[in-house]
Amino acid sequence: MIDLLLQRWHTSFGDAAPEVVVRAPGRVNIIGEHTDYNEGWVLPGAMSRSLYVLLSPSSQGSHHWIAYDLDEEFQQHNFGSDTTEWLPWTRYIEGAIRFYAPDTGTLRILIGGDLPVGAGISSSSALVCGVLYALQMMTGRKETREELALLGSRVEREVIGVQGGIMDQSAIMLCRAGHVMLLDCRTRETRHIRADLPGYRWILINTKVKHQLIDSDYNLRAAECGQAVTVLQTRYPEVSALRDVTREMLDAVRLPEVLYQRALFVLEENERVHQMVDALSRQDAAVAGQLLHSSHRGLRDRYEVSCLELDVIADFANRYPGVAGARMMGGGFGGCVICLLREEVYASFAPECIAMYTDQFGFAPEVIAFELGDGAERIEGLGA
């Protein structure tokens, strides 16, 4: 991939090498969905699949950015114009530059990699974090990785308008190979946990659908959780987020049914995160799989962010001999199912799942094999 990107760089920008080359990984989340913006706990990891950002100052007096995978280019003299009509990916880059280094001058940027867009593995957060990290490498500034992750989260909230938490950016910046990261989204404390289970492997199955509900309903779920907190505060003023709520507190306050179901899911999902940490620590694949299955049911029935395509794959996987468990992953309404399955059944499970899904929907899903990799890094020896 790097060789192809370097070829495109030289074709578009000439002989000079990019000043900085950065790898920003995609994000998987073992468990802890929709808990981050409720100040709860999550258990993400960084993928071996990644987005690469090649960057240099431009002497041409205008920005020139290229999205290799989309075969799209963008040129702009300055950011004075309204960005709402820009190509979607350019708004993430513009936001990262504006928030981090608005006076850095015009830039040449090439992005590309092997992260599928719209699959729920945070390709957009990888782009923001990759650009922020590349800008840091170029300018020599010394922010911590935690600070860059928080800035990346601000870009997505304030520029793009998706009211998420800090999980995606923290995973992309902080994770370690072979581990998942227990992240407390209130205190931002982290703990790295081995995620290899002997005889088992993690895979993703990309539905290749992204229903239009995702952005609007993601923000709606965040708003519903906030509404539940407001009602709970009338009796429990010490509550500032659903992370503070116990089941007893929830049952003692008369919430509208929808808000009750949303809040109950968050409480149960937070519990599952801690149970998963224990299961991984004991290398108990059976319990880990049960937690995945339970999480999917909650996301489908209580939080209502699943869709038919996700349910079909999760149901197939959760009935398949040798699969410990599976659940939808990400914001919902499309994207991926994460599965934990025995190594020896992978060869039969993957084609059977593809055939089943293709028969039902008329197109094939993508089975994504991955390893748990390191967070964002500079690729040494390639820049100027």
Image (cartoon, rainbow, N blue to C red):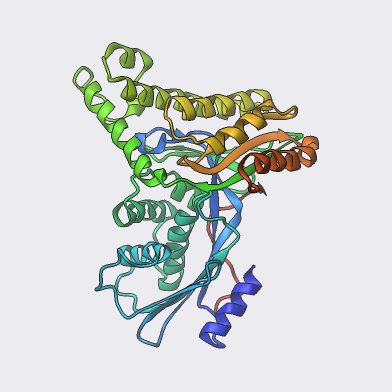
Q: Position of residue 67 (x, y in %)?
A: 50, 69
Q: How many marks?
A: 0
Q: Position of residue 118 (x, y in %)?
A: 50, 52
Residue depicted at 30% across the width and 63% down the height? 84
- The quadrant of the picture occupied by the C terminus is bottom right
Residue depicted at 53% across the width and 35% down the height? 308
**Looking at the image, which is closer to me, 27 or 120?**
120
Considering only vertical position in the picture, is 77 above or below 31?
below
Q: Position of residue 266 (x, y in %)?
A: 41, 27
Residue at the outermost left position: 234
* Residue 129, quarter of picture: bottom left
Q: Position of residue 151 (x, y in %)?
A: 35, 55
Considering only vertical position in the picture, is 100 above or below 344?
below
Residue depicted at 25% across the width and 30% down the height? 227
- Decide if residue 359 is on the left or right side of residue 273: right
**Looking at the image, which is closer to me, 101 or 29?**
29
- The quadrant of the picture occupied by the N terminus is bottom right
* Residue 62 shows up from this direction: yes
* Residue 22 shows up from this direction: no
- Decide if residue 344 is on the left or right side of residue 165: right
**Looking at the image, which is closer to me, 1 or 149?**
1
Considering only vertical position in the picture, is 343 above or below 53?
above
* Residue 6, quarter of picture: bottom right
